[in-house]
Amino acid sequence: MDDVNMQVIARMKSDFPSKFGIPRQSGLVEALRSTVIFEPEFRNADALRGIEGYSHLWLIWQFSEAVRQEWSPTVRPPRLGGNTRMGVFATRSPFRPNNLGLSSVKLLGVEQTAQYGTVLHVGGADLMDGTPIFDIKPYIPYSDCHADALGGFTDTADAFLLEVNFPAELLEKLPEDKREAALSLLSHDPRPSYQRKADRVYGLPFAGFDIRFTVDNSRLTVVEIHKL
């Protein structure tokens, strides 16, 4: 098998220290804010000339926490409850031969910094903090948007949205600019598909806090929040 060498051009700076709770697709939680920081050899402002003219970008990156020596032709998508197997190439599972991820993110701003050179501020990213990024391409509406596209099993699978009960005195412990994102993250049910116990207390590490919650049927209740 041929090997192809790729360079990491950037890394993501996000509020997710681990993969638990990260949205299952980009764009699901629009309130998320992240920053693309380029590696030193790629901190050339000319490489980003004109990028501010686009509203959205494609990020091509590595599922760095899911790298394995072996791969399976079938996987169990969370969208189907984690019990039904589908072909790996019919899913966006991280467990793939080359562990590549593809995310469409909103470009919120381009900033020149003293420490990191030019950085990109993006919204709606589904990347863990430190995720290696291999390439960035502009999202082009006339070719990338297909109004008649079919979503396969994702069109018919049950929604995972939960009703979130986040007591005000606990929500106020989060920075104000992180609250909307936290509420949206929780509503998308961050639990793994194989862990659905009503009496279990789960912990979501987000934005420097550990958000502890339980789920009873379709209602999620935050019970504690601590600073990490």
Image (cartoon, helix red, strand yellow):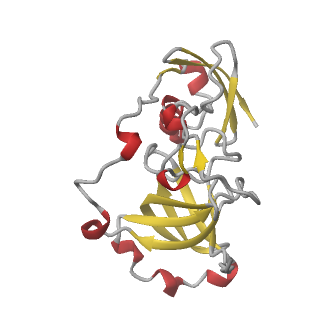
* Residue at image location 32% in from the left, 65% down from the top: 144
Quadrant in the picture for the C terminus: top right
- Position of residue 188 measured from the top left corner of the image (x, y, whole percent): 49, 33
- Position of residue 223 measured from the top left corner of the image (x, y, whole percent): 65, 17
Asked where in the image residue 117 lies, by quadrant, the reply is: bottom right
- From what the image shows, is residue 9 above or below residue 146? below
- 12 or 4, which lies in front? 4
* Residue at image location 59% in from the left, 45% down from the top: 75
In the drawing, does residue 211 fall left or right of residue 143?
right
* Residue at image location 30% in from the left, 49% down from the top: 150
- Position of residue 118 measured from the top left corner of the image (x, y, whole percent): 56, 75
Number of marks in the rendered image: 0
- 115 or 2, which lies in front? 2
Asked where in the image residue 215 lies, by quadrant, the reply is: top right
- From what the image shows, is residue 111 above or below residue 63? below
Outermost bottom residue: 46
- 121 or 94, which lies in front? 94
- Position of residue 192 measured from the top left corner of the image (x, y, whole percent): 63, 33
In the drawing, does residue 220 fall left or right of residue 140?
right
Quadrant in the picture for the N terminus: bottom right
- From what the image shows, is residue 67 above or below residue 79? below
